[in-house]
Amino acid sequence: MYVCGITVYDYCHIGHARMMTVFDLVYRWLMASGYQVTYVRNITDIEDKIIKRAVENGETISQLTSRFIGYMDEDMGALGILEPTHEPHATEYVPQMLGLIEKLEQNGLAYKAEDGDVNFSVRDFPGYGKLSGKSLDDLRAGERVDVNTGKRDPLDFVLWKASKESEPEEVKWASKWGSGRPGWHIECSAMSCALLGEHFDIHGGGADLQFPHHENEIAQSEGALRHPFVNYWMHNGFVRVDNEKMSKSLGNFFTIRDVLKRYDAEVVRFFILRAHYRSPLNYSDAHLDDARQALTRLYTALKDVTPDALPLDRGDAFAVRLTEAMNDDFNTPLAVAALFDLANEVNKTKSPALARQLKELAGILGLLQRAPQQFLQAAPVQEGALGETEIVERIEARKAAKKARNFAEADRIRNELTAQGVVLEDKPDGSTEWRRA
């Protein structure tokens, strides 16, 4: 499996979190299903935005990219993202990129333009558009006037960019076409083929990469190799904010670091997994608050029950439900529903065997692996929330109301606390425990 990773010039955002979590889930499930998985997730460490940012900052490309790779690793570690088998950097595979471009030139699909760039000739590749469903006529109708007069056709895309005097020396490589650097699309073709072979199973990434990036990957890979490239393409849906696509230009942009200041990382992971990977994911504080309360219910089921030490029972009814859901195009909403039904049974029976099933099945999804009290006590206090002294005072007032058989007042206090995110649990001995949801 090859997944297009992150272009490292800024902090990772919640869209990156979704992509990483989705394909981490795919990776985990394939391994849990008995497959041997070689997972390649690249790092794009040479690209126009990177060069621009480094020049603006007055630092080298490697200084910029090393710093943000470190930040990326911290964010992904917090979200429980497993390390891939290989994490290639684009700058390490320039010779392989040049080799593919040379094959394309030999096959009549690449040409050097007057401006020094080497371009892919889209109209000479018969299958162009087969992934995205776009026809050349549709693309031609929507094309803009191309300021790059070096292209034979506006639809052609760059494979090798000729060096500019203003660019740093560290982004200039020698080639038979002159000094330059690779285009973005050829990077992934070269890295995937070098590490997985010229024909592999799964290629993934965000929905925004389907066209033109993945369409161009198919064209240049199959154009150079003359055989099929990938068996299955997978694309996760967009993250939306108030039903608009998240973007910096709209100002509705959230970095993972900002979100983790307010929400536990496992809550963010759970929020992402509650939606099917191909569906849009609507980001809001209300949805994250709901995810936190839902995850709290799962952890609460394990709070007073110690799971037994036996292995996961794959024949258990809940395990079968989760397996069927995950085998149906990674249907995590149904898988999570099975976990909640299992948690209800744990609450009813206090069965160590069912508690083990819950912890093990959730673990396949990267959830419920902390001690319950660790999660429950870590729930953040929201701004304006009641303090501990005020909560205890209200619990005592509720106890007095119940003793006086004023159940309406007792219910009112309980509802007030619930609205404040405080969950009460009445014990058989008459005491009441509380926690923040």
Image (cartoon, rainbow, N blue to C red):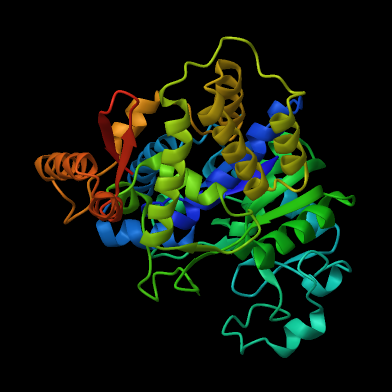
Question: Is 39 placed left or right of 378 in the picture?
Answer: right
Looking at the picture, tell me which residue is in the foreground, 307 or 91: 307
| Residue in view at x 16 percent, y 56 percent | 384
Q: Quadrant of residue 36?
A: top right
**Furthest residue toward top:** 309
| Residue in view at x 39 percent, y 41 percent | 265
Q: Can residue 39 be seen in the rendering of this structure?
A: no
Q: Quadrant of the N terminus?
A: top right
Q: Position of residue 64 (x, y in %)?
A: 34, 48
| Residue in view at x 23 percent, y 53 percent | 409
Q: Can residue 102 be seen in the rendering of this structure?
A: yes
Note whether 206 is above or below 349 in the view shown: below
Q: Position of residue 22 (x, y in %)?
A: 59, 46
Note whether 262 is above or below 52 in the view shown: above
Note whether 179 is above or below 403 in the view shown: below
Q: Position of residue 321 (x, y in %)?
A: 73, 37
Q: Position of residue 324 (x, y in %)?
A: 77, 39
